[in-house]
């Protein structure tokens, strides 16, 4: 994530800058991770917490996808799109849900066929 923040031309810099301190705070030690995990477990009973954690997971997957395009990383692009493919059906985007797997197959076979 550090390379995202250091690149000033990246349009995702503000989003990554807000996530970086949270990531560093969790990596300070094992006790902090356990405390955060316990807190998440306690809050998991509420519908609002489940909603926002789901939104955060989706936004992070989209962020990885956009970064793969920005960095021109083919393998990251395929991996990110594979993770996002499930969300198209969930969010009722039927055509994307049908055609993304076809596109992924073509992208995976591209190095072998050309």
Image: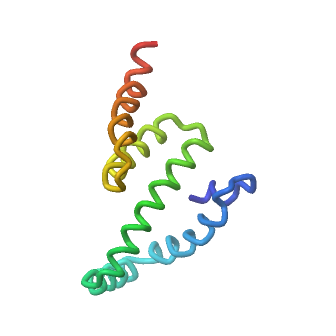
**Left or right: 103, with 11 as reference point:** left
Near-viewer residue (56 or 36): 56
**Residue 65 percent across, percent down from the top left:** 50, 48
**Residue 57 percent across, percent down from the top left:** 40, 63
Residue for point 29% across, 84% down: 46
Farthest top residue in view: 114
**Left or right: 22, with 92 as reference point:** right
**Residue 52 percent across, percent down from the top left:** 40, 74
Residue for point 34% across, 44% down: 94
Q: In the rendered view, would you say 53 is above or below 5? A: below
Residue for point 45% across, 75% down: 26
Residue for point 33% across, 85% down: 39
Q: In the rendered view, would you say 111 is above or below 11? A: above
Near-viewer residue (70 or 58): 58
- Quarter-of-image position of residue 19: bottom right
Near-viewer residue (40 or 34): 40
Q: Quadrant of the N terminus?
A: bottom right
**Residue 54 percent across, percent down from the top left:** 36, 68
- Quarter-of-image position of residue 21: bottom right
Near-viewer residue (111 or 81): 81
- Quarter-of-image position of residue 16: bottom right
Q: In the rendered view, would you say 55 is above or below 79? A: below
């Amino acid at each position: 994530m550090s390379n995202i923040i250091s690149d000033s031309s990246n349009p995702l810099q503000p989003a990554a800058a807000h996530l970086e301190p949270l990531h560093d705070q969790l990596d300070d030690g094992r006790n902090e991770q356990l405390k955060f995990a316990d807190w998440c477990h306690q809050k998991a009973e509420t519908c609002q917490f489940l909603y926002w954690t789901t939104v955060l997971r989706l936004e992070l997957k989209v962020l990885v996808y956009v970064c793969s395009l920005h960095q021109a990383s083919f393998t990251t692009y395929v991996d990110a799109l594979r993770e996002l493919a499930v969300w198209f059906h969930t969010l009722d985007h039927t055509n994307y849900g049908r055609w993304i797997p076809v596109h992924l197959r073509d992208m995976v076979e591209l190095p072998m066929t050309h």
